[in-house]
Image (cartoon, rainbow, N blue to C red):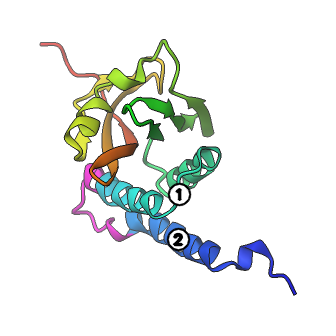
């Protein structure tokens, strides 16, 4: 007798990982963790989950939406898939809009994703980075800060995952 696909061990493991991802922010809500620390914990767990399974671009928006739903204080998130030349091939971006979420692909000529301040430093250094506050024109269209975590295999960055937090515009004194 055939088993239903949802009974496959891989799906059970993914459900456990997603449940753990949703619990990460709750574990850090003791009042001592800053919002950035919460992002770091949740995003690191999300990046580990992505690294543990093959990245299928068609599944990314749903995975990102589940991540954001479990972390309602986060504004947006993307997973950038890179080709062998370290150029973005896809980057579904899920972000808050009104009482729900909107989605767009950041790989478009006008956005110049490969040169964004949130992407290039993490890709080039192969380490996690935070941006200074910036206005994300063409993406979330708000002032934000972004944490970016590169996914590295065999010494090569093959994807990057981000979380955006809304912030105030820097004062110009």
In x, y percent, where is residue 161? 40, 45
Where is 38 relative to 98, above or below? below
Residue found at the far bottom of this picture? 1
- Callout 2: SS: helix
Packing grade of label 1 (10 A; few <14, some 14-19, many >=20) is: few
Where is 119 relative to 51, above or below? above
In x, y percent, where is residue 166? 37, 35
In x, y percent, where is residue 77? 46, 42
Q: Earlier in the sequence, mark 2 or mark 1?
A: 2
Return the residue nearer the eye: 19 or 159. Answer: 159
Residue found at the far right of this picture? 1
Q: Report the quarter where the N terminus lies.
A: bottom right
Q: Say which residue appears at 33% left-offset and 65% top-offset.
A: 29
Tag in front: 2 or 1: 1
- In the picture provided, is 107 more to the left or to the right than 171? right
Residue 54: which numbered mark, if any? 1
Residue 75: which numbered mark, if any? none
Q: Report the quarter where the C terminus lies.
A: top left
Q: Say which residue appears at 40% left-offset and 56% top-offset.
A: 47
Magenta highlight on residue 36: yes
Q: Where does the magenta region start and end? A: 27-37
Residue 19: which numbered mark, if any? 2
- In the picture provided, is 4 more to the left or to the right than 34? right
* Gap between marks 2 and 1 measured at Cα: 19 Å
Q: Say which residue appears at 57% left-offset and 53% top-offset.
A: 63
Residue 119, picture quadrant: top left
Where is 147 relative to 69, above or below? above
In x, y percent, where is residue 154? 31, 54
Q: Give the total number of marks visible in the rendering.
A: 2
Q: Say which residue appears at 80% left-offset and 81% top-offset.
A: 3
């Amino acid at each position: 007798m055939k088993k239903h696909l949802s009974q496959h061990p891989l799906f059970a493991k993914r459900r456990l990982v997603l449940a753990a991802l949703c619990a990460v922010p709750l574990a850090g809500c003791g009042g001592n963790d800053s919002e950035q620390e919460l992002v770091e914990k949740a995003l690191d767990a999300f990046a580990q989950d992505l690294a543990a399974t093959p990245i299928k671009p068609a599944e990314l928006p749903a995975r990102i939406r589940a991540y954001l739903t479990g972390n309602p204080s986060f504004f947006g998130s993307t997973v950038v898939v890179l080709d062998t030349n370290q150029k973005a091939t896809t980057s579904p971006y899920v972000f808050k809009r009104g009482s729900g979420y909107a989605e767009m692909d950041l790989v478009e000529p006008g956005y110049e994703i490969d040169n964004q301040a949130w992407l290039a430093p993490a890709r080039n250094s192969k380490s996690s980075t935070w941006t200074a506050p910036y206005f994300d024109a063409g993406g979330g269209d708000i002032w934000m800060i972004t944490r970016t975590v590169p996914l590295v295999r065999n010494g090569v960055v093959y994807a990057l995952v981000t979380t955006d937090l809304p912030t105030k515009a820097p004062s110009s004194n």
